[in-house]
Amino acid sequence: MSKNADTAADNPLIRVAMKAHHETAMHMNRSAFACLQAAPDSVCGRIPTGTAHPVASSERDAVIEKQRFAACRNEQLATQVELRREILMLREALTESDDLIALHKIYRESAEKRAAAERESTRAMRVQLSKMDVLNRALQAEASAMERVLNNPSSYLSGRKAHPLAALQGKRVLYVGGRPGSLSAIQWLVEASGGTMACGSDTVDCTGLLAAALPDVDMLMFPADCIDDDTVKMFEWICERNRIACYQLRTASLASFVELIDRLSAFAKTGAAVRSARFCQRHG
C-alpha cells in the first residue's frame, strides 16, 4: 500500500486531483461555517423566524381588540352620562312647563270667572235698563196726561167729550186698594168727570163681597204696587167671568190713574180696546 501511495504521489495527475479535492473541502467547510453564523437560532434550537410571526400577530390583534372594547365602553359610559344630564335638563324644563301651565290655568279660570261675572252683570244691567226704559216711558205718559188735564181743567168740569177724562162719564168704577191720600183725589176726578166711584178692600177675604159688587160696576181698577200677584189673578178671573173691564194701574198715584183714563179716552174715539199696563214694581 505504501508502494501505491508513493506511486500516486509521483503521478502529476493524482497530485492535481488531490489538490482540487482539498480546495473543494475547504470551500465546503467555509460555506457551512457561514451558514452557521447566518442562522444561529436554528443551531441553538430556537423557533425559526418564519413561525414566530403568527403568534405575534394574534397577540397584537388581541391587544387591539381589548383597546377597542375599552374605547367602546368608555364611549358608552360618556354617552350614558350625557344622556342622564340631558334627561335631567328635560325633566327640569318639563317641571317648569308644568308650573307655567298650572299658573296659566289659574289665570284662565280667573279670567273666565271674571268674564262670566261681567256677562251676568251685563245681562242684569240690560234687564235693569229695559225696566228703566219701561218706567221712563210710563212716567212720560203719566206726566203728559197730567199736563193735558191741568192745562184745561174746565174742559172736564163742563162735561165735554173732548177732555182727557171723558171715558169716566156715566161709568161706575170700583177702585180696589190704593192709598188714602190719593183715593180722595181720584174719587173727586171721577165724580167731576160725570162718573161714580166705589172703594173696595184689597184682601182676598172679601172675594164674595167683591163678586157681589161687580154686577153693579162698569170697570174694576187696582194699583199694582198695592195688590199681590195672587189677588191680581183672582180679580182678573172674577172680571173675566162677569165680563167686567179690569185695569191694572202702575202705582196708586193720581198720575197713574189719569194716564189710564187718558188712554181709555183716546182709544174710545177709535173704538179700540185698551189693555192695562202690566208693569209690576216687584217683578218689572
Image: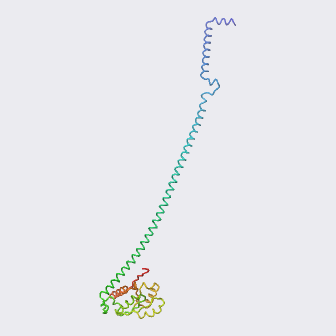
Q: How many labels, in total?
A: 0
Look at the picture and state if 94 lies above or below 272.
above
Percent x, y of residue 8 = 65, 7
Look at the picture and state if 190 lies above or below 281.
below
Quadrant holding the C terminus: bottom left
Percent x, y of residue 61 = 58, 36
In the visual, does 16 lie left or right of 92? right
Q: Residue furthest front?
A: 181
- Say which quarter of the image contains residue 270: bottom left
Which is more toward the observer, 15 or 279?
279
Which is more toward the observer, 265 or 109?
109
Which is more toward the observer, 90 or 154?
154
Q: What colour scheme was applied to this rendering of the protein?
A: rainbow
Percent x, y of residue 55 = 61, 32
Percent x, y of residue 88 = 53, 51
In the visual, does 276 lie left or right of 31? left
Quadrant holding the N terminus: top right
Look at the picture and state if 98 lies above or below 68.
below
